[in-house]
Amino acid sequence: MSDQIILRVATKIIVPTILLYALYVQFHGDYGPGGGFQAGVIFSAAFILYALVFGLRRTHRVLPTWVVRGCASAGVLLYGGVGLASMVMGGAFLDYGVLAHDPKHGQHYGILLVELGVMITVFGVMVTIFYFFAARGREDL
Amino acid sequence: MGVLVDFALLAFLATTAIAVVRTTNLFAAVMLAGIYSLLTAGLFTVMDAVDVAFTEAAVGAGISTVLMLATLAFVGSRVKTPQLRITDISAKVPVRRPVFPLVVVLVTGAILIWGTGDMPAYGDPANPIHHHVAPRYLEESEHEIGVPNVVTSVLASYRGFDTFGETTVVFTAAVGVMILLSAMRRKDRFGEERWGEESVPDLFRGFAPTFWLGQDGRMRAPPSQPGEEDEGGTP
Amino acid sequence: MSTVADVLSWGFLLTGSFFVISGGIGVIRMPDLFTRLHCSGVTDTGGAGLVLVGLMFQGGLSLVTLKLLFILGFLWFSSPVSTYALARAALAGGEEPFWAEDLDLPPSARIPGFSPRPVPGEGEE
C-alpha cells in the first residue's frame, strides 16, 4: 500500500503521535489511568500500523526480529533485576523501599522501573506475535 | 439512569455475542469480536475501572483484531463447515446436530444464574471483600507509597509478585507462539527449507550453552564427565 | 458553570447525537458499501466532533479542554484517512459500487441535470 500517498503521509504523521502517547500513558500511569500494559500495547500498535501501510519488509528493517525478541526478554529481566537490586541493597525481593534514601522515593523508583520493564516486555511480545502472524504463508520472511 | 446504560451495554453485548456465533463470514465475526471488546471496555468504564477498560480497549479492540485479520488473510474468510440449525430434522449432510452441548450449556448457565442469588449485593460496603486487604491498600497507599493512582500502587508495589508473574506469562505467550509457528517452516544453516523439524539454535540461542550445539545445529547430549571431550556431531 | 456555556454544550451534544444516530440509521439503510462508508464517516467526524466540542464546554477552560482538542484533532485526522483506506481496499477487492441506473426510478424522480453513467458491463452490485 505504499504507493498511496494519503496513507503514507497520514501514517508518517500518526505514528510519532502514537509513540508519544504511549510514553505519556506509561509515565503518567502514576497519576491517571495507564501503566505498563497499556503503554506497551499502544507502542506496539504504532509499529503494527507502520507494517500495515509500508509493508513487513520495511518494518523488519526498522525493527529487526532480534531487537524485538531482545525487548521481550529484557523487560522481564529488568523487573527481576529490580527485585535482585533490592535484595542487594538489603531488603527482600521486590522491596522497593530500600532502593533510595527514603522509602517513598524508593517506591517511586521501583514502580517506575518495574512499569518500564512491563512496557518493554509487552511491546516486544505484541510485535513478535504480529511478525509471526503476518509472515504466515509468505515464503520470503 | 446508570442502570439504563448498564442494561443497554449488556444487551448490546449479548446481541454481539450471538451474532459472532451465528455469522458464517469470518471477517464479520472478527469485526464483531472487536465491537464486543469495545462494549466490554464501556462496561468497565461504567463500573469505574478505567485502567482495565483502557487495557481492554487497546488489546481487545486493537491488537486482537489485527492479529485475527492477519490470520484471516492466510486462512480465508469463509466458514468451511455447514451450520445447521437445531430444528433441521432431515439433514441431507451427515453432520451431528449439537443438542447435547446445548443442553449442558443451558443447564450450567441456569445453575450459575441461580447461584448468583446467594451473592451479596453489588458494591455493598459491607461485603467481605471490602474488609480484607482492600481497606489497608486504600488507606495506607498514600503515605506508604505516595503514588496518586492506587491501581498502579497496588499493581506494582503491593502485588508486585503477581505483576512479575503476569509479565513472565506474557513473555511465555510469545515463546509459545514462536515455538508453535516456527515449527512449520524452518530454514537451516544452508538455506534449505525443512518442514516440521525444529532446530534448536534459532529459538534457544542465548538460552542454552552453545557448546552443546552440534555442527548441523542440533543439540547433542552434554558430556557425562567434565573431562570428556566430544567433537560435534549428530546426536 | 455559566448558563451560556451550559446551553451551548447541550446544543452541541444534542446535535452531535443527532448526527451519530442518523449515521447509524444510514449505515443500516444504505444500499451499498460506499454509501454506508459516507454515513459512518459522518458519524466519525461530524457526530464525534460535535460531541467533543460539547464536552469541551462542559469541562470549562482547563487542561481537559486541551486534551479534548487533541483528541478532536487526532479523530478528524485519522477518521477520513481510514474511510479512504477502507473504500480503496473495497475497490481493490472487487466491490462494485451501486450505480444509479440500477434503480427503476420513474421519470419524475430523476434528478434534473443528472444523467446516469453508461456502464460497459452488467453494473449490478
Image (tube, rainbow, N blue to C red):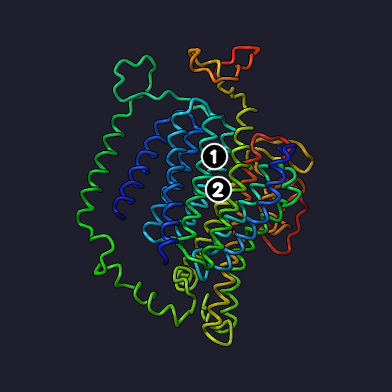
Secondary structure under tag 2 reads helix
Type of amino acid under label 2? Ile
Residue B157 at x, y percent in the picture: 48, 73
Total residue callouts? 2
Name which residue lies at 63% across and 17% down: C117
Name which residue lies at 48% across and 79% down: B145
**Left or right: B135 with respect to A70?**
left
**Left or right: B85 with respect to A127?**
left
Name which residue lies at 29% across and 18% down: B89
| Marks 2 and 1, how far apart at CA | 23 Å
Q: In which quarter of the image is residue C37?
A: top right
Judging depth in this view, the residue of B216 and A74 nearest the camera is: A74
Q: Circle 1 is placed at which residue position? A: C41
Residue density around tag 2, few if under 14, some if 14–19, many if 20 or more, within 10 Å = many
Q: Circle 2 is placed at which residue position? A: B63
Q: Which chain does tag 1 point to?
A: C
Residue B226 at x, y percent in the picture: 70, 64
Judging depth in this view, the residue of B114 and C77 nearest the camera is: C77
Badge 2 and badge 1 both on one subunit:
no
